Each structure stands twice: as structure tokens, then as C-alpha cells.
Image (tube, rainbow, N blue to C red):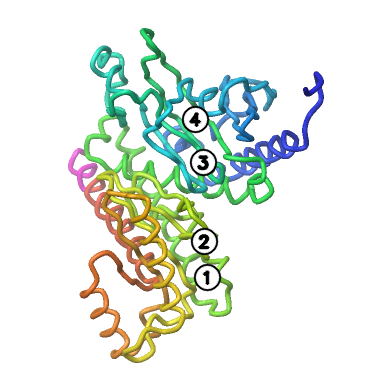
Amino acid sequence: MKELGESTQEELIFKDIIKEYFKRVQILTTQVPSDLRRLLLPPYMLYSGFKGRLYIDSTGRLGFEIIREKASRPSIKTVSAKKRVEQEIFGVLGHENMFRISGKEVKLVNLILTCRDFVERYEHELPKGASVLIFSKPGIIGPFEIEKNAEIKIIHCGIYWIKGKRRYVKYIPFAWIFGNTNLLEKIDPLTHAESDFYSSLFGKLYEIAMPGYKKFLDEHVHLKVFEFYRELIKKVRREFKEKLFITQADEYVFQRLLERYKFFLCPGALFIETQPILQEEVRRKPDFHIQMDNNRHIYVEIEPPFYKPFIGSRPSSRLRDAINQVLEWKEILIRKGVKESVSFMIIIGLLDDLSEEEKKALQTFNETRKDLIIVTWDWIIENINKVENEIISRLSREKTSHHHAK
């Protein structure tokens, strides 16, 4: 039994990670004009202080949550977890949870998590206009289970649940859960802070770009928001191009780059997780798992841009290795009985480095495969350009509207 006031090594490491994470977040927020921060960033990124709790349960899971959003300084208190960490934080945990989180750097942002029973009885109590995720499977009383090698952040989410005959409502400004203490050794809080900061910014972009959002904003502010995003996207594209043309860069460089700007891997995804676990030992885990909102899953393998997908009309050795990995993942998912729509993506090479024969081989390969697509790193640049073009188009319409209004 731990003595009062005594801290374990894991607690000290976790507290240091939290403190370094928030220090970095505070620095990053200065990139956003002060009058736009509350509009574009989640509330927790703007705290000067908070009161938080740290849990370690009997299964080895760890969790941190902010319980008071306003305080003079950051304060983290360790609490003995008598229940599973998920139950301490969510308030509810089922025997068969609807979602099982198996990857790293998973984020749930701006969601209302609720069960069918609550919706049927108290739908009027759910926040209007919120994104609602309803768990409707009969007999399920808990939303998430965090697997032993998984890690997740819950940001600006609400839990609306039925516990027995009682209503249960909880707001979570920020929580961070780890499946086991060993994961702490691999955590870089600075990388996490950057990834969360940019994910939050670009996630908010789509919300603000919706026509109905304008009624909440002064026209001048709306124009300033789009100007800010246009400059930010220029910075992101410049960083991608600089890295992509450093031909000797290690694969780790591109993994970290995509972790920071994973939004551009698939704009509009429900969430994107890094290196998900596939329940069985594999030679290499997928680099990313994309969860689409229509229950479609995409597993992604990245290879450095200086490796070609094809040499002439034949797949390169690097591409063959990547395809073999994909086939291994596919077999595992089939054995697991996964019934959702699953497809795979391999990102490798640059289009300008390919001969006409190699471009034709790439096109032919993609035309003959149903659940696997091979793209070059130009795919990411194209996604960046699409988002930028949408911003420029919206900015032009806003300026025209503003001019006519005068």
C-alpha cells in the first residue's frame, strides 16, 4: 500500500509529461492572434492554471483528467483508483464496450457520448447543435475500453448516460488515458502538444467554414479567421515540401511530420490514430488507422518519398514489402471477424520521380485493386491544396459579400 504523500516513479513521470505538455501548448497558442484564440482553440489550451487528478488502477492503466478549469496554477493530485481508470473518468464502464481503443494518439474532440436509453428518456437535455455519438446496442452500459497498448485523449466531450435508474451527466474538458505504465517511456510531450494543437486548429476550420457558422461571427472576425488559416496552410505546405525533398531523411521524419499534421492525411475523418494494435503480433503495425464517420476504416502504411513504388513496370522491393504487410493485417482482421468496411493505403515515392511507364504501372495497379490504393506523397500536398483552395474561395466570397454590404 502506498504511504500518504509517497509518489511512485510512474506518477512522477506522468506528472512531468503533463506539465511539459501544457507548457508547450501555451507556447504554441501564441501563434494564434489573441482575439481568435477562444474561437479556434479548445478551452483547455488557454488555461493559465487548472486542478487535475491522476489515477493508476489495479490493471496498470493510467489516467489524468482536469476537474477544475480555473486555477491560479497547474495542480495535479494523485487519487487512489478503486475502479478501472475508464470508469473513474467516464463515470461508466460496460462489460462489452462499444468502442475498443487499440492505437496511440487517438483523440475524441467535441463529442457528446450517450446511450440509447438516455436519448429515449431525456433527449431534450442533450446540447443543441452538438455532435452526438449514440451507443445503441442493447445491454451495453459503457462507451470505451482502452487496451493495454493504447492511448487516448478526450477533449471537450460530454457523457450523458443512464446508470441503473439514475441519469449521469459529466463534462470532460481534457483527459488523457494510457493502457499501461510502460507507454510513458515512449511519450514525447512536445510532439503530442504540437499534434493536438494543429489537429484542433484544422478541425475547427471545417466547422467555421460551414455557411451557418457566420451568424455567430462579426464579418470582420470571419475575414480575419480565413486570412489566418490561409497563412497557416502556406506554412504547413512549405514544411511538407522541405521534408519531402530531403531525400536522405529517415522514415521517422515523415512519420512525425504526418503525426503533427495528420488532418491532411484524410480531412473530414472522425479520428486518426497512430500505430494501432491489431490484436496479434505483426512484423510492423500500421502507421495510421483512419476512422470515417460512416464506419469505414482505412489502414495506412507510409514509406519514405525517395523509394519508388515501381521500377519500370514491376513493383519495387520496398513496395512489395509494404504490400506483404498489408496482406498480413488483412488476414488478422479477417480472423478477428471484422465486418466493417476496411481498406488499405500505401504512401510511397513522389510523382515527379516516376517515368511515364512507372506512372502507368501505378495507375494500372490501382485500377485492379478494390481494397488497396497506392499513392505518392503528392496525395498529402493535394489534400493541403484542396483545403487551401476552399479557404481562398470562401475568403473571396466573404470579401465580395462584405464589399456589397457597404
The tag earlier along the polypeptide, 2 or 1, is 1
In the picture of the structure, the residue carrying the numbered disc 4 is: 43
Q: Position of residue 119 (x, y in %)?
A: 26, 19
Q: Identify the secondary structure beneath mark 3.
A: loop
Task: Decide whether the magenta segment is chiefly helix, strand or loop.
Answer: helix
In the picture of the structure, the residue carrying the numbered disc 1 is: 243
The tag earlier along the polypeptide, 2 or 4, is 4
Give the spatial CA distance, label 2 vs label 1.
Answer: 8 Å
Identify the magenta region.
400-405
Q: Identify the secondary structure beneath mark 2.
A: helix
Q: Nearer the viewer, mark 1 or mark 3?
A: 3
Give the position of the N terminus as an image quadrant. Answer: top right
CB under 8 Å between callouts 2 and 1? yes
Q: Any mark on residue 401, and which? A: none
Category of crowding for the residue at label 1, using alpha-carbon neighbours closer than 10 angstroms: few (below 14), some (14–19), many (at least 20): some
Q: Is residue 134 magenta?
A: no
Q: Nearer the viewer, mark 4 or mark 3?
A: 3
In the picture of the structure, the residue carrying the numbered disc 2 is: 257
Q: Left or right: 262 with respect to 373?
A: right
- The residue type indicated by label 1 comes to Lys
The tag earlier along the polypeptide, 2 or 3, is 3
